[in-house]
Structure formats: C-alpha cells, structure tokens
Image (cartoon, grey):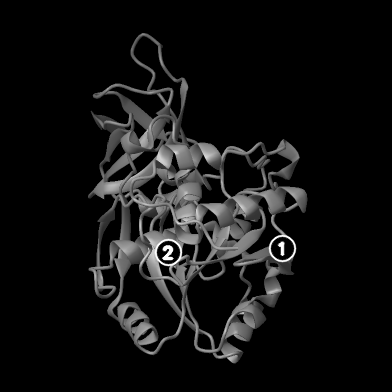
Amino acid sequence: MTPQVPGPAESADAALERLKFELPPERIAQTGAEPRDASRLMVVGDEVTDHVFHELPDLLRPGDLLVFNESRVIPARVMARKPVDAGGYGGGQVEVLLLREEEANVWSAYLKPARRAGNVLLLGPNGEHRAEVVGVLDDGARLLRFDYDLRPHLDEIGRLPLPPYIEAGDDEAHWRERYQTVYARTPGSVAAPTAGLHFTPELLSRLDARGIERTSVTLHVGAGTFKPISGPVSEHVMHAERYAVSEATAGAIGRARAEGRRVVAVGTTTVRTLESAWDGEAVRAGEGDTRIFITPGTPVNVPDLLITNLHLPGSTLLLLVSAFAGEERIRAAYGAALERDYRFYSLGDAMLLENVRG
C-alpha cells in the first residue's frame, strides 16, 4: 500500500473529519500494563502487525537512536479555599491546576470555579500558602502570585494531575509512581509523556545491549496538548510549552543522521521538540517556548520512527501522527486497533510508526 501524503492544499479540517472514530468507553485504559512493557505494540508500515512492547529491541536496529522526553510530572492539582472575610463569608473550595511558572513565583493556572483579578486563594490543607490572582490570560487561565517559591511544597500539598478519563481513586502513592516514566528527571510537566510509560529499566538495558543508542530532550507537557480541536483547525491555538535540547543530544542526532542511522522519537512531545529545534539543516541545541502545530501536509524532518500511544479523536495529536505516518496508514491502523481490542489513551497500548518520507 502506498501511503497517502496529504498535499499543502488539502484541508486539515477535512483530514480531521476523516479521522473521526467512535471509541467504546471500555476501550479507554484505566490501568497500565504490568509489567509496563507487557502492553501491546502495533507496528505500522506497509503492513500492520501486532507485537508486545518488550519485543522492541528486536524491532529496532543496532545503531538506531532513541530520543526520550525526560520531563517529570509535578503534583500540579492543588485544592484551595477562599479566605473567610470579616462577615464570615467565604471559605469555599477552589480546584487549582497549576500549568507552569511564568516568572519567579508567578504561575499560570486553571481555577474551578474561576476567580477575578485581586482575589486571594489559600492553598494546601491548612491554607498555609497564599496566592493572589494578578491577571487573566486569553485562554481563561489565571496568573497566581505567591510570596515565595511554591515548588518545594508541591509534593506535600499537590496531587498528580491525571487525565479526566482515568478513574483515579485515592491511591496517590500508586499514581505518583505509575503515571511517571522510569527515566523522568526534570520536573515541569502537568501531563505525562505517555509513550514513555511502556519502558522498564530492564527493557532499557536490553536496548543498550542490542547497540541501540539513547539520548533525551525536555519538553514540559502542558494541559493544552490534549485539548480537542473545537473549531476550524486554522483557528486552534496551541499552548506554549517549554523545551530544551542539550549540546550532547544535538550532537548525537547530528551524528546519527550523518551516518544513516535512524532517529526514533519516543512520543509526540519528542517530535514537537525536535521539529522546534530544527533549523532546516540540523537540530540545534537551545531552549525556548514552542507552539508548533504539526498537521497533514507539514513535513516532519528529524525522526524516522515514532513510538506513540493511541490518541483522542479530534485531537492535535491525531493530526500529528497522520502528518508523520500518512493519513491512509493511520486510518488503517486505528481501524485495526479497534478490531483487535487495543487499549487507548494514556495508559493504553502503543504504535511504532514509520515516517512517510522514509
């Protein structure tokens, strides 16, 4: 089968419409596979074949370069309350989802219910951390100013911000381990780079033994990454996410490409980081914010292969994988996944996709 590569003139809105599918609720994974690498892995190329994730070393080649996103999820969901005024009014609860620190001690956050500029919130079980709403962003997020660095206190007062489709229960200790990659290092994400959840220390050792190289980038995943597209694709605004590419990683990618070795992105966040750092000739070291939006017709220049989970219909991620692997292949793969009982979303199964330019 020759993959379909949508041309620049083709509407991304039409592609998104063709990529719609109905997903039975029971196919949304509520728990991750145990062990992690026991999840299923669909390999999507000219054919669609079924594997188990622990077979990955045999599906790759010695010399391939795996690129991971080593961002760590922070306990960004915090309960707050309104202060009680002199008349005895207030004290109601407010749910706070911290998004990122915009400047020293000032965080963007979603509040439920929303609060106005000038309002004060008391965060933590005893209301020991005071924040003032000092601004409102275009997407409705609020800016919260604290008197000090809140980050050292998040482990104590916060909970991991699991996706709303996961019935989490009260076992916070379990989720702090399970909704985190085994190689997570730099805190900053409010959602896990979920393609990496399938890796175990043992699998990483087997990849090393097979001669498969590893390196990493950082992209702090924001809540907007998984937001469905609610209007025309051209009007969808991507949230800014911070990324960093080290000199060592840029060098490793440059050497792999020069030597004809394949670059394998672990997750769509890694793809977005590499494409943000691509200057037309090479991946350059550096850091910054990215709003990159990859849709059908957009060339994906750096990775040759992509490991990714199965995504939400109507999402920017579904457009990204369609741009990467070709719409026809993605439609066939998702049809096969529905027929073959694959599990979807953050804790579900995975796919290994070939870049249509390859």
List x then y, in percent, for residue 81.
Answer: 43, 27
- Amino acid identity at mark 2: Thr
For the point 30% across and 75% down, the residue is 246
Would you say 222 lies left or right of 338 here? left
**Is residue 278 depicted above or below 341 in this figure?**
below
Give the SS element for disc 2: helix
Which residue is labeled 1 in the image?
40
List x then y, in percent, for residue 83.
Answer: 37, 23
List x then y, in percent, for residue 61.
Answer: 57, 85
- Amino acid identity at mark 1: Arg
Depth order, front residue of 299/274: 299
For the point 40% across and 29% down, the residue is 231
Would you say 33 lies left or right of 293 here? right
Q: CA distance from mark 1 to mark 2?
A: 21 Å
Tell me whether the residue at label 1 lies in contact with that at label 2, contact meaning CB atoms closer than 8 angstroms. Answer: no
Residue 319 circle label? none
Depth order, front residue of 330/7: 7
Res 123 quadrant in image: top left
Can residue 75 be seen from the camera position used here? Answer: no
**Is residue 203 depicted above or below 144 in this figure?**
below
Which residue is labeled 2 in the image?
270
Q: Residue furthest top?
A: 87
Q: Residue furthest front?
A: 2
